[in-house]
Image (tube, grey):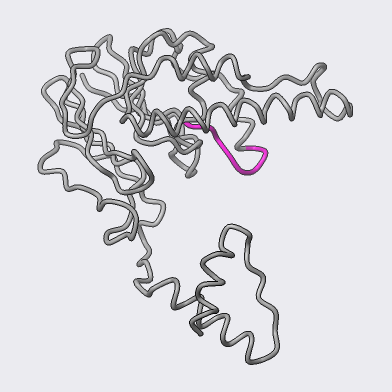
Amino acid sequence: MLTLTSLGGAGTVTGSKHLLSHGDTHLLIDCGLFQGLKNLRELNWERLTIDPRDIDAVVLTHAHLDHSGYLPKLVHDGLSGKIYATPATRDVAELILRDSAHLQEKDADFANRHGFSRHAPARPLYGVREAERAIAAFAPVRLHHSVAIPGGATLLLRRAGHILGAATAQIDIGGQRIVFSGDLGRYNDAVMHDPEPVPQADYVVIESTYGNRSHDVADPVEALGRVIECTVQRGGTVVIPAFAVGRAQSLIHHL
């Protein structure tokens, strides 16, 4: 019998972990950290309802921390299977997981030096060593290339258009086809490929963070221009983040 259990990413938008089981085979689709309010972050310290040693493989749709950030903890707790993802997702996850581990080590050190932790000593959820072990477990999978994964299953990844490397995951197992959307991007994005259609599936597990919203199709540069122009005309001040300064300067030049 095929079963699906959400260990995260249901009831909240973070901590995505979906356990797909068929007989003795257990596949985890995404492995994210809970982020945000304290009550959510504390969920990262709770035991999973399945022993990580019983998980045969992980399929990663993309590298954002709420989908990949629990991997080092999972590996530390006993995961020995591979982590399947696109090559680009593997490369982005390498940067994100190392950074996450480094920040957690620094936060724990800061808490210990200033004595404000409830625990003595304060410990990170995982450190750089665990992140490196998780990175080493990645098995890159090319887009549109069907590969065999544990339990007699096959995996096919298609573009999801979300971030670099993001993919939908089609898993055929037990005579059924289940597709996990991960996070989906918009169509007609200036820098990303459009999400690719899925021709057929028995079940689709789809993200719905913006499922009840219609995205504004207006050009964001033109919208920013209108805000700047209106603000300047009434003698106001426009505060622009450092990462957007270059584009804003170019826009102001043409006003």
User: In the picture shown, does residue 123 fall above or below 38?
Assistant: above
Q: Residue at x 44, y 34 (%)?
A: 92
Q: Residue at x 38, y 36 (%)?
A: 62
Would residue 33 be counted in the magenta stretch?
yes
In front here: 96 or 183?
96
In front here: 60 or 173?
60
Would residue 207 be counted in the magenta stretch?
no
Q: Residue at x 42, y 30 (%)?
A: 91
Point out residue 100 in the picture as x, y percentages from the top left corner: 59, 30
Point out residue 191 in the picture as x, y percentages from the top left corner: 34, 55
Spot the residue most to the right. 114
Query: Which quadrant holds residue 232?
Result: bottom right
Relative to 149, 115 lies left or right = right
Point out residue 40 in the picture as x, y percentages from the top left corner: 60, 37
- Helix, strand or loop for the magenta stretch, by majority: loop
User: In the picture shown, does residue 171 fall above or below 229?
Assistant: above
Relative to 66, 211 lies left or right = left
In front here: 105 or 92?
92
Query: Which quadrant holds residue 240?
Result: bottom right
Q: Residue at x 52, y 19 (%)?
A: 72
Query: Which quadrant holds residue 10?
Result: top left
The magenta region covers 32-39
